[in-house]
Image: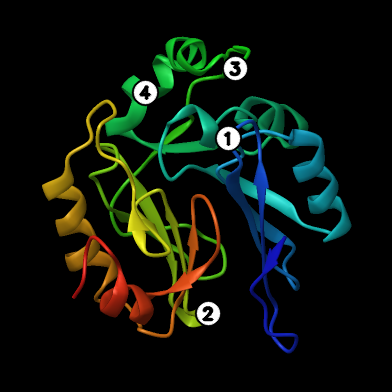
Amino acid sequence: MSEVEDPDSTFILRSFPVGPLQCNCSIIGDRISGRALVVDPGGNADQILSLLKELNLVPIAIVHTHAHLDHILAAGDIKRATGAPIYLHKEDVFLWDMLEQQCGMVGVPYKPLPDPDHYLKDDQDLACCGGIAIHTPGHSPGSMSFWFEEHRTLIAGDTLFQGSVGRTDLWGGDMNTLVNSIKQRLYTLDDEAIVVTGHGPNTRIGIEKSSNNFVRA
């Protein structure tokens, strides 16, 4: 589990792999208010719910960087257990709606999900820890990243990885769009910002700008 926290801060961030494809789910919260976001619950709902309880956090939203199966599988279970609404960018609804097909392609058991409650928009205030949603299409048309400026933390989903970028050969992916999203939206952020990726280890904006194998500043 990755913990990106200053012990003197009220900010909580716990990121950990879940589900059949080990997507990094993140719990982001505020110690004082107890408000939290659950980002990309791709499986292991019991583990996510247990950690929320341990941290004394109540999710106000379940937010998704995109709608590939490995980032959404437990969204329904988390919503049923907490009542938190589901957020997704509208351009990824077609992926959400084809979850059964996605599951069949990789041999993962299919379980229907409720429809998203709200659609994320570019620069939308996430109402928790100063977070802002950034539309970063390319890996999928509705891919989002979540930026917490005060805490110099970016949740990048499958847009940006340590030394790599998200694949663009799936439904609606486009490499030129992905490169533009990274250069124009992510590489303009604080070089010291921690990047929590959709899979694998964390990195930093400045490191990727200088050494990423696919997109450099």
Q: Label 4's element?
A: helix
Number of residues whose C-alpha sits closer than 10 Å to that of mark 2, classed few (under 14), some (14–19) or many (20 or more): some
On screen, residue 46 above or below 191: above
Quadrant assignment, res 201: bottom right
Amino acid type of disc 1?
A: Leu
Residue highlighted by disc 4: 95
On screen, residue 207 above or below 130: below
Query: Can residue 38 be seen by looking at this rendering?
Result: no
Q: Alpha-carbon distance for marks 4 and 3?
A: 16 Å
Q: Position of residue 118 (x, y in %)?
A: 43, 35
Q: Position of residue 11 (x, y in %)?
A: 66, 75
Number of residues whose C-alpha sits closer than 10 Å to that of mark 1, classed few (under 14), some (14–19) or many (20 or more): some
Q: Label 3's element?
A: loop
Quadrant assignment, res 45: top right
Front tag of 4 and 3: 3
Amino acid type of disc 3?
A: Val
